[in-house]
Image: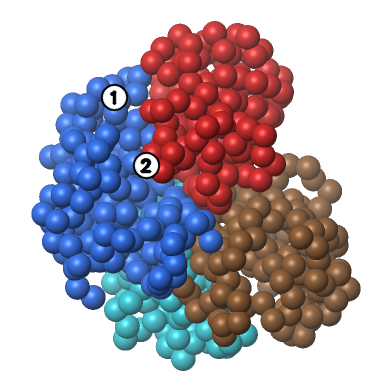
Chain colours: A blue, B cyan, C brown, D red
């Protein structure tokens, strides 16, 4: 139940494996079962109307849960996203970064579940929530390969 | 942003409107945006294998969010469940009550969203999570009538 | 990709393993990737207002997908429900049975996904939809045990 | 229950309102309650490993349901995405376009629900499924504004 990668190691590793998007995401805080992630909002994350797009929020939630699984399981982890549910509750502010607070609810042998609450920075009203589920490959196997 | 019904008033009202099941559910705690509810587990809530059934956990989550909407909107409220997502993460203990901790994430004019974490009493590992969404009738209208 | 149990064998086996509820559910039709199930609506399935309750619809969706997994994998199958999403779209008619049409979208080694559309008998407007996900135990192991 | 915009009118209007992404999406077919949409897969839709990314599939599902609501309600429609659930079932082929088949399950006064099945072109095994829900503004009002 302890971290295999600390915040710096996790950040470095994410930059290696996601070179195209590593500037988008900043790990702000990390504990054994919680991670806080910043989405540095740029024009490409916006949709008509100037709010943060749904795909950008999906991506933020997915990266949060994937990152905390990495921090717990280590660099060889090959978790595959198998499901998500999201609720969009308020209009995100396109002029502010988004801050996601994620709780890892379960990290089993073959299944992981994480919950994410997303805010526009400076507000305490959640913009969106997400739950992401992941299939984890059995120990020693090559990949989860979508179960 | 304050409660229209306190814990006792809410409990009394739930007993009126749900006479068949009022013994199943006990409001343990209530604040403006959180409610804790106990499911008094009886044989009829179990499934083969002696664990609490999925429909019983669905019912617990639904009652939680419905109850906190009642507490905030008052007795005339006519919220209608429009959606749910649930993740089942651990086997519930059929010999123990279930305790649900619910947070009301949004209470808008026409849409409410609540998150629920469910535990077997005495454990801090969540058995299941749920998000329930509700359609609220416009002020002065008769019912939400499924949007 | 063929059925291990036909409709009669599946019905018989469900009656053995779900003795309390076997009268509630009738397998109306079964093919390799589709099953049609009837919920014989009784008073205990209703909620105040005389419509079919949410937990009853959850139970119907869960039984559908569990049953088609049984039909494909055989009696030793030990699938465990890990997730569901549901949308409630119209008021079910409490005076009519419910008919559920289920499609098995995936039956992998460790993960199964099924979609369910539910109707009040005689209507072509869907009352609710559900997607249920299941964890399947690895071949030869005792149980999925919630991943 | 008829279309306000036909396929050509819908395509033209989408190009106006989504100038940045109009080349990504092609309306392949449109009826009163079904739409088929192509995602023209380019490098920017891929994730490490060469498969189509989760955010791209979220975007495809969202565009499908939004588009059929536009076709039914007309250009002044201001639907707001309020929820989604998705299941990722197989690895998409990054070298092929994705084809999404969407069914509009409900188009009420204030709530719309659409189901989407997504395939890599040429395969009949679904890569992912999604359900998207939308809040619709009351007739004559300016916007749904997140309920």
Q: How packed is label 2: few (under 14 Cα within 10 Å), some, or many (20 or more)?
A: few
> Which one is in front in this view, the residue at disc 1 or the one at disc 2?
2
Residue D95 is situated, as x and y percent measured from the top left of the image, at: 52, 32
The chain under label 1 reads A
Among the 4 quarters of the image, the one containing residue A25: top left
Residue C43 is situated, as x and y percent measured from the top left of the image, at: 72, 70
- Where disc 1 sits, the SS reads helix
The quarter of the rendered structure image containing the C terminus of chain D is: top left
Examine the rendered structure and indicate whether residue C16 appears above or below residue C44. Answer: below
Question: Relative to residue C2, is residue C81 drawn left or right?
Answer: left
Q: Residue at coordinates 61% horizontally, 54% vertically from top-left?
A: C130
Q: Residue at coordinates 56% horizontally, 67% vertically from top-left?
A: C110
Q: Decide: marks 1, 2 in contact (CB < 8 A)?
A: no
Question: Relative to residue B85, is residue A27 drawn left or right?
Answer: left
Q: Residue at coordinates 48% horizontally, 11% vertically from top-left?
A: D15
Residue D21 is situated, as x and y percent measured from the top left of the image, at: 43, 18
Report which residue position mark 1 lands on: A44
Residue A21 is situated, as x and y percent measured from the top left of the image, at: 26, 36
């Amino acid at each position: 139940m302890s971290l295999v990668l600390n915040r710096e190691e996790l950040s470095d590793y994410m930059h290696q494996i996601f070179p195209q998007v590593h500037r988008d995401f900043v790990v702000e805080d990390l504990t054994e079962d919680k991670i806080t992630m910043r989405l540095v909002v740029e024009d490409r994350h916006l949709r008509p109307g100037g709010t943060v797009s749904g795909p950008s929020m999906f991506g933020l939630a997915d990266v949060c849960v994937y990152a905390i699984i990495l921090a717990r399981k280590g660099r060889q982890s090959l978790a595959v996203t198998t499901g998500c549910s999201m609720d969009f509750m308020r209009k995100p502010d396109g002029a502010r970064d988004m801050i996601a607070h994620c709780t890892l609810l379960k990290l089993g042998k073959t299944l992981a579940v994480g919950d994410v609450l997303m805010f526009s920075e400076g507000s305490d009203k959640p913009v969106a929530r997400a739950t992401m589920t992941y299939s984890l490959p059995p120990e020693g196997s090559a990949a989860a390969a979508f179960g």
